[in-house]
Image: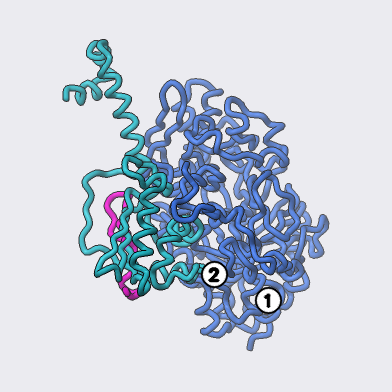
Chain colours: A blue, B cyan
Amino acid sequence: MNSPTPASPQSPSRNTEPTEPTETTVPLEIDDIQGGALYERPSPYVGTYLLLQIHEPADGRELIRRLLPLLEPGPASTEPRSGAWLTVAFTYEGLTVLGVPQESLDSFAPEFRQGMAARAAELGDVGASSPEHWEKPLGTRDVHIALAALAPDAADLESVVARARRAQEEIPGVEVIWRQDCYQLPTGRTSFGFKDGIGQPAVEGVGTPTTRRGEPPIKAGEFILGYPDETGGLAPMPTPEVLGRNGTYIVFRKLHTRVAAYRQYLRDKARTREEEALLGAKMVGRWQSGAPLVLSPDEDDPELGSDPGRNNDFGYTSDLRGFKCPAGAHARRANPRDSLDHEMSVDVRLHRMIRRGTSYGPMLPEGVLEDDGEDRGIIFVFAGAHLKRQFEFVKTQWLNDGIFIGAPAEKDPLVGATDGSGAFTIPQHPIRRRLPDVPPFVVTRGGEYCFAPGLRALRWLAELT
Amino acid sequence: MGSEASSRPGVRVGSTSEFSLFFHVKPGHGEALHQALRELQDAPGYRPGDYEMPIASIHEARFVPFDDDTRLLFATSFDGPWDAYMEDFAAKPLKLFDSIFQHVVGYEGLPSLQAVKDFILSAQQTAGGYARNYGGTVKEIRKAITVNDAFQEVLDDPEAADALQHPALRPLLDVAAD
C-alpha cells in the first residue's frame, strides 16, 4: 500500500527506526531475572504447579527465603540444582498479605490489581468459562503464591515435591491449596495433537537465536520490567524499583480442551482422513507436526515441523488472502507477523507474548471420538511486561474478535470465546469453504494474574516486616 | 481541552466507533496548518477520487479548522475499540499526520508513550450522538464493493439471466432485477 506518507515522507516504522544508543546498551541483568520467563526448559519435562495460601505473613517470607537459593536465573541447566527448575510468582493478594506497602501495591498494573477473575467479562470468560464455574481456589482471594516446578523426569520432580512438603511442615503458615501436574511430551504436542510453543519472540540481549529471519529481536523491556521497550520508553514499573526491576507479569490459565468434540467436529465436516487433517491444520495455521501452512500448504511435512531453524521462518505477505493459511487460523491470529504491517493501524511488535504452556491430563488416545470424561488441556502461561497490551489485547482483539481480519462475527476457532454460533472461513479455489457453528473447544477452568519478581526483589520481599 | 474524565471509548455502532479529537492550534500557525492540510489532500489516498487511505481501519478522516483557525477537529470512524489501539497509534498513524499535528498545542514530537496518551486523551471527546447508515468494517465494505462490481459484470453478460436460474444462485437472482 501507499506507505510513504503525505505528512511525513519517511514514515518511520518502529522496525527500522534508529534507536538511541543508550537504549540498546542497557544490559539485561540476567542473573537477577527468574530463568523461566526468558528461557525454555529442555523438553520433554514433567512439572507441577502449586498454589499457596499464606496464613502467616512471616511464614510466607520464610518460604521466599528458602526458595531463593533454589531459583536459577539464566538458561536452564541440564541438571537443575534442586532437581527442578522453579519459578515463583505472586498474586496481588499475595503481595498484600506479605506486607508490601499500599503505595507500592498501587503502583502495579491495574489489571494485575484487579485479578483475572475480575477481568472475565473483558476476556470472554463467560458462560461455562465464567469464574463462578472455575475450579476452586482459582480466581479467589486465597491464591497468594504460584510456584511452578518443572523437572527432567518424574522421579526428580517427586523428590523435589517431597522435599517441599517437608519444608512446608516447618512453615505451617503457608498452605498448598492447589496442585496441578503438567508435562510436555517429547513431540511438543498438546491435547489437540499439534506441536505447540513455536514462534516465541526472540528477545534482545537474551542470546536465544532468532528463528525468523528479518525479524529483529523484540526489546527486552517488552518482557522484563526496567528496560526500554518497543515504544522506546519503559513499561510502567511497580515501585520501589528494587521490587519492580527485573520482574515480569505472568498470566496463568488452566484451559480444558474438549478434544473429543473437536475431533468429532472435524470428522463430521470432512469426507476423508486427509481432509480432516487439512481442516485441522487450517484451523491452527500449522500441521500437527508444527509445519506452517504457509511453507507447506498441501500436506504435513514432519521434517519441517520439527526443524526449529525453519518452522518459524516465514511471514504472511505472500498469502494475504489466506489461501494457504486462513487469516482466522489460530496461530495467525495470535501472531499475525507481517500480515497487518501494510494497514498502518497496528504495530504487531507491541503485542508479542512469551508463552510457557504445558499440557495436563492424559492425552485422549488417537482415533477416539467419544469423550472419556478425563480433564485434559493446556496450562497457558504468558510472561510479559504489559498485561493489557500484550495478553489482553491478543485475547480480546485477535482471538475473541474478527474485526481486524474483516470478519467481525468470527472468532479464533480453537480458543475464541464463542457460544458455538461462529463460523470459520477457509479461503480456497474455486470457492471459499465456511465451517458453520464452530463449538467451543476450550473451557477456562480458572487462572490468575501474577507477578514474578527478580531475585533482588524476592530478597526485598523476604525482608519485609 | 477535554478532561480525561470525559474521554472514553467512542460511541460504537456495530464494529465501528466514532473518534473525534479537538485540538487548539498554536498561535500564528493557522496558515501553516492550512498548507499542511492542502498537502495532505494532494497525497495518495487523500486526492479526489482516491479511496485507499494508508490507515486501513478508519472509514474516513476529516480535519476541520474552526474558530478562526484557532481550533482543529480531527474526526473519523474506527473499526474496533480505538482505546485498545492507543499505543499503536504512536507507532504509525500519528506519524502519518505529523506535519499537521505540529501546528497544534501538545504535540511536541511525542517523546514518550505517556505523551501520546496525554495528547490523545486531552483532545478526545465522545460524541453526544452517532449513527451509521451501513454496517461493516472497512475490510468488509471493500470486499462488498469488489463482489458487487464482479456481480454487475456478470449481469452485463447476455447469458447471465439464464445462468442465474440455477437454484444455487437464487439469492443473487433475487437482487439482480435492478
**For residue B74, what is the image quadrant?**
bottom left
Residue under numbered circle 1: A458
For this orientation, the residue located farthest to the left is B178
Q: Is B56 on the left or on the right of A258, as rendered?
A: left
Front residue (pair B9, A274):
B9
Numbered tag placed on residue A405 in the rendering: none
Toward which corner of the image does residue A13 lie, by quadrant?
A: bottom right
The amino acid at mark 1 is Leu
Q: Nearer the viewer, residue B53 or B159?
A: B53
Label 1 crowd bin: few (<14), some (14–19), many (20+), radius 10 Å: many
Residue A332 location in percent, x, y?
Answer: 53, 42
Task: Give x and y (percent) for residue A244.
Answer: 62, 75
Please report the residue visible at 49 percent of the width from the left and 34 percent of the height from the top. A322
First to last magenta residue range:
B1-20
| Sequence order check, earlier mark of 1 and 2 | 2
SS at badge 2: loop
Label 2 lies in what chain? Answer: A
Q: Which residue is mark 2?
A: A143
Three-letter residue code for mark 2: Val
**How many numbered tags mark residues here?**
2
Q: Is residue B10 magenta?
A: yes
Q: Secondary structure at mark 1?
A: helix
